[in-house]
Image (cartoon, grey):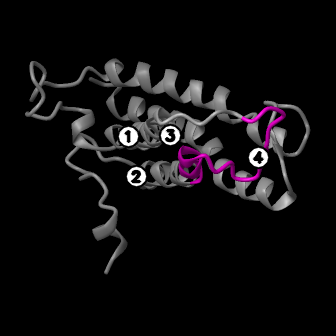
Amino acid sequence: MRFELLHPSPRLGGTARPVPQWAVRSARLIPLAVLPSCIWRLPFAFDFEMGQVYEVHKTWHWWVILYVFGLSVLSEGLAYLSFGLVARWGEVAPAWLPLIGGRRVPPFAAIVPAALGGLGLVVLWDPLPLAFLHLGGVPLVEYSNGWWKALAAVATLPLTLWGPLVLALTFAYYRRRRAE
């Protein structure tokens, strides 16, 4: 069984101008870079703290399950939007969309949100490696031992690729569509 059967990529190609191969690879890498943190976060839904140590124990609530699973689904959904920067549906809205279906997507209607999103992701995630190395960045919670901290680092550090990759894809999209 091939990986594509378990995890199909959105249909690529059909764009007005050819998409560079590095951009297609980058778009495919983004959901895979986000996936480890989505999986790592799931035990928190069931009050398993993944080695994190808190000064005061938090009370678990049923809605935490919805929050954690919803956050994981939302993260992967947003990661999949990067395919729009390399696929036809990023240039022409799919026909099934009400009101805008079949219409050409104005380039800046994709470039502005993608650039702002990429910059936001850089600000959000790129200080993380410094925090794991205790060199500044965002404050981290304490872990009961180094293995839990290493697992958290392995699961969350790929998120630092998300913002720069989105910005690179946005630039490639801009260069491809700037003549329109």
Circle 4: element type: strand
The picture places residue 175, in percent across and down from the top left corner, at: 41, 32
Instruction: Indicate whether residue 51 is drawn in magenta.
Output: yes
Instruction: Single out the mark in the foreground, 1 or 2.
Output: 1
Identify residue for label 4: 52
Q: Which mark is residue 77?
A: 1
Q: Which mark is residue 143?
A: none
The picture places residue 23, in percent across and down from the top left corner, at: 44, 48
Q: Is residue 13 above or below residue 112?
A: below
Q: Earlier in the sequence, mark 1 or mark 3?
A: 3
Identify residue for label 2: 24
Identify residue for label 3: 68
Q: Earlier in the sequence, mark 1 or mark 2?
A: 2
Q: Which residues are magenta?
A: 40-57
Dot 4 amino acid type: Gln
Disc 1 and disc 2: Cα gap in Å? 17 Å
